[in-house]
Image: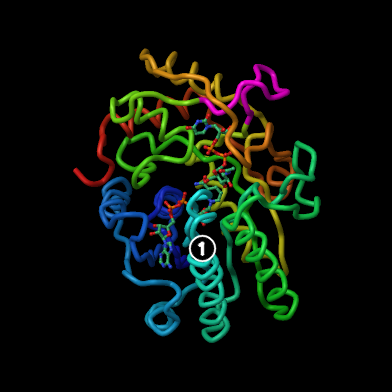
Amino acid sequence: MKTILLAGGAGYIGSHTAVELLNAGYDVIIADNYSNSSPEAVRRVEEITGKTVKTYEVDIKDTEKLEKIFQENNIDAVIHFAGLKSVGESIEKPVLYYRNNIDTTLSLLECMEKFNVNNIIFSSSATVYGEENPVPYTEDMKRGTCTNPYGWTKVMMEQILEDTAKANKNLSVVLLRYFNPIGAHESGKIGEDPKGIPNNLMPYVSQVAVGKREKLTVFGRDYDTKDGTCTRDYIHVVDLAKGHVKAVEYIFEHKGTEIFNLGTGTPYSVTEIVETFEKVNSLKVNHVYGGRRQGDLPECFANADKALKVLGWKTEKTLDDMCRDSWRWQKNNPDGYNK
Ligand code: NAD
Ligand code: UD1
């Protein structure tokens, strides 16, 4: 049985990935400083799967403490989710973002080298395609120009990982470029739990529906898209988590760096999201149309062929599933994990 270390594994995507890895028979260790998550998420992962998860409360930047985890366990692969991810905050606090996101990556690579752990899967983002590349994005496109420090940290970390794999022929790196993860585990026990006012669309929609926010502002309806609002490639977080299981299976057979888009390949507009959420959950989401948000691209969606061809992975859930599951989580946990 292989042991997978999930750095930042108590977060939204990490907790869902932990469930899928445990269900597939892997041992899972979670290392997290809970800066944007809660130990309760891990408890619920255990509840869903009926399995135990070894946890470490640790700042991944702290190489000495991180080494202890590598000393105490036989780790076969690392999945690196640990990062700060708010675009707006990254513009206000660039040093915090560069320090946290880059240093966590460097500490992990240093420990991995010291303890001869040679497999790392990294949470990258569609944001690395930048402004220049045309949609749909394919993995062979050059990384583009980002509009914010968060995006640049992803570009830089991809480069760091690629360079390290070039220098160390034993190292295997898989860069997973996520599109827009939404939804929640169908049990309604784990989901996205943003602190403060949500930046992202689906948590905002859910919080309006549950009465925590008065109304959603749709950012711009004058884009050159099907209905004037921006389109995105929304992916159910459980499909995304299953993509990680496929990447783990793949990484043990592979050396060097490989990149995969994890998306559905189908774009939906903001208006379609609101309308679908209202339809499948039989409720109304109070919303108004406002001006554009700075830095938003009109369209963003994947060509997801490579993940199907190489990993044998494709998404299975529909937009209806995503909206239903997001709402179940929000309705059952109006205050997230803090109830
Ligand atoms: P999240 O904030 O829910 O999870 C990140 C986890 O990392 C949190 O539990 C946080 O406490 C932890 N963490 C952060 N810095 C740490 C540190 N120094 N030491 C230890 N733990 C630390 O975010 P998520 O949505 O689950 O995203 C996971 C990864 O995927 C992130 O790297 C994010 O940038 C990337 N990503 C997310 C999305 C998205 O839309 N959610 C899209 C593309 C990429
Ligand atoms: C954003 C980030 C991206 C990051 C991703 C996950 C920007 C420019 N991009 O992607 O780098 O990887 O989150 O954290 O911030 N919308 C509204 N009203 C709202 C919120 C969003 O209309 O209150 C619209 C946006 O204009 C966009 C769509 O909904 O068209 C999706 O927005 P969001 O969920 O923030 O994701 P992205 O902007 O695609």
Q: Residue at x 40, y 62 (%)?
A: 28
Q: What stretch is highlighted in magenta?
A: 218-231
User: Is 25 left, or right, of 47 in this rendering?
Assistant: right
Q: Where is residue 108 in the image (x, y as percent from the top left)?
A: 52, 75
Quick check: 233 above or below 154? Answer: above
Quick check: 172 above or below 168? Answer: above
Q: Tally the numbered discs.
A: 1
Q: Where is residue 316 in the image (x, y as percent from the top left)?
A: 56, 32
Quick check: 66 above or below 98? Answer: below
User: Toward which corner of the image does residue 34 lie, by quadrant?
Assistant: bottom left
- What is the magenta segment's predominant secondary structure? loop
Mark 1 CB near ligand 1 (8 Å cut)? no
User: Toward which corner of the image does residue 72 lie, by quadrant?
Assistant: bottom left
Q: Dot 1: what SS?
A: helix
Q: In which quarter of the image is the N terminus?
A: bottom left
Residue on which the image places disc 1: 97
Q: Position of residue 31 (x, y in %)?
A: 38, 67
**214, 16: nearer the viewer:** 214
Quick check: 165 above or below 94? Answer: below
Question: Within the magenta stretch, is there residue 263?
Answer: no
User: Is 65 left, or right, of 77 in this rendering?
Assistant: left
Q: Quadrant of the C terminus?
A: top left
Residue found farthest to the left: 339
Q: Where is residue 270 in the image (x, y as percent from the top left)?
A: 56, 25
Q: Which residue is drawn at 51% across and 77% down?
A: 107
User: Is 276 left, or right, of 310 in this rendering?
Assistant: left
Q: Dot 1, how many residues are within 10 Å of its Cα: few (below 14), some (14-19), or many (20+)? A: many
What type is the residue that disc 1 sits on? Tyr
User: Toward which corner of the image does residue 227 lie, by quadrant?
Assistant: top right
